[in-house]
Amino acid sequence: MSFAPIALFVYNRPWHTRQTVSALMANHGASESALFVFSDGPATSEAEAGVVEVRAYLRTISGFKNTTVVERPGNLGLANSIIDGVSRICDEFGKVVVVEDDLVTSPFFLQYLNDGLSAYRDEDRVISIHGYLPPIGGRTPETFFLSGADCWGWATWKRGWDLFEPNGVALLEKLAVHPNRRRFDYIGRYPNTRMLRQFVKGGNNSWAIRWHASAFVLNKLTLHPRRSLVRNIGMDGSGTHCSSHDDLSTPVAISPIAVRAMPAIENRSMWNRFRMFYVILLFRRFVRKSLRINM
């Protein structure tokens, strides 16, 4: 099995970047994986020192098959940087593992993603492999499929990424006529459609909501693991679209996830588990917001 190249996206957070790279270096398969680091340029003068420090650190990285650092001369922003970088790697290599600079991975993260890429390479309905699992609790199958796509440590093929639709208006139009459009929001339990509308209005610049919608409107599936292989350390207010909370924090797996080919069918039981998790998640956030307002 050939390991997919890793596309790592960084900006101006030296501490977070070091944690992310150190965890990737400890992965089984790191020495067989080419690492491409896309370093975005500073958007403001205040961000410049962090960008310079991150880039200095990037030049010291070792432990991968090879390392290529792409220093953006200007600031593309997270969404454009990811869209450009993933497209470049997919066009050249046909597949990619995608990591951002605030994701700490399990030592078995790369093996799982690459096993998934191999197992479902020719299964057209599967658009991606995802490494993060929220703290939903309960018994969970080793791997399972859900509709759409996700963004915290994932992998895809060129055939999958070619389906990415950057136009938010076009995605909203397709959602409006989709027979299962209410499932996009977990039947009112998670505001995906609202986030997509906010993107169209300029309220956010999320590539992730467009990636999820692109997969959902085409009835594509993403493979998820029984235990999370990713922990997000950016929920400290330091990242794009990230607030300070630990609702989604989870420890990473300390043993491998076994990937065995199975029919590409959404797991309805797991979909319901996710829906209930989002009910609780949004209630917690509502309570916190209410407490802040009334303090």
Image: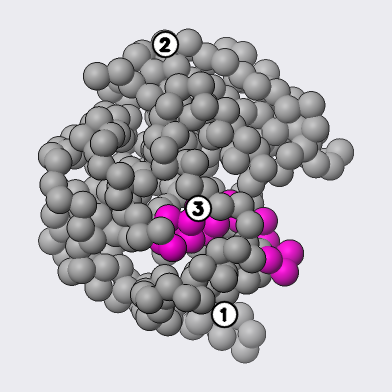
**Residue 232 placed where, x, y %?**
45, 48
Magenta stretch in the rendered image: 200-217
- Nearer to me, 19 or 169: 169
Q: Tell me the kind of residue under disc 3.
A: Trp
> Looking at the image, is 148 positioned above or below residue 41?
below
Q: What residue is rendered at 50% in x and 53% in y?
A: 211
How was this image coloured?
one colour
Q: Is residue 201 magenta?
A: yes
Number of the label disc, if any, that sits on residue 289: 1
Q: What residue is rendered at 49% in x and 83% in y?
A: 287
Q: Tell me the kind of residue under disc 1.
A: Lys
- Nearer to me, 293 or 234: 234
Say what secondary structure mark 3 lies in.
helix
- Nearer to me, 234 or 151: 151
Number of the label disc, if any, that sits on residue 211: 3
Q: Upstream in the sequence, badge 1 or badge 2?
A: 2
Q: Are marks 1 and 2 in contact (CB under 8 Å)?
A: no
Q: Quadrant of residue 53?
A: top right
> Looking at the image, is 80 positioned above or below residue 54?
below
Q: Which secondary structure is most common in the magenta stretch?
A: helix
**Residue 115 placed where, x, y %?**
23, 31
Q: CA distance from mark 3 to mark 1?
A: 28 Å
Say what secondary structure mark 2 lies in.
loop
Can residue 239 be seen here?
Answer: yes
| Label 1 neighbour load within 10 Å: few <14, some 14-19, many 20+ | few
> Looking at the image, is 53 positioned above or below residue 285?
above
Q: Mark 2 = which residue?
A: 65
Say what secondary structure mark 1 lies in.
helix
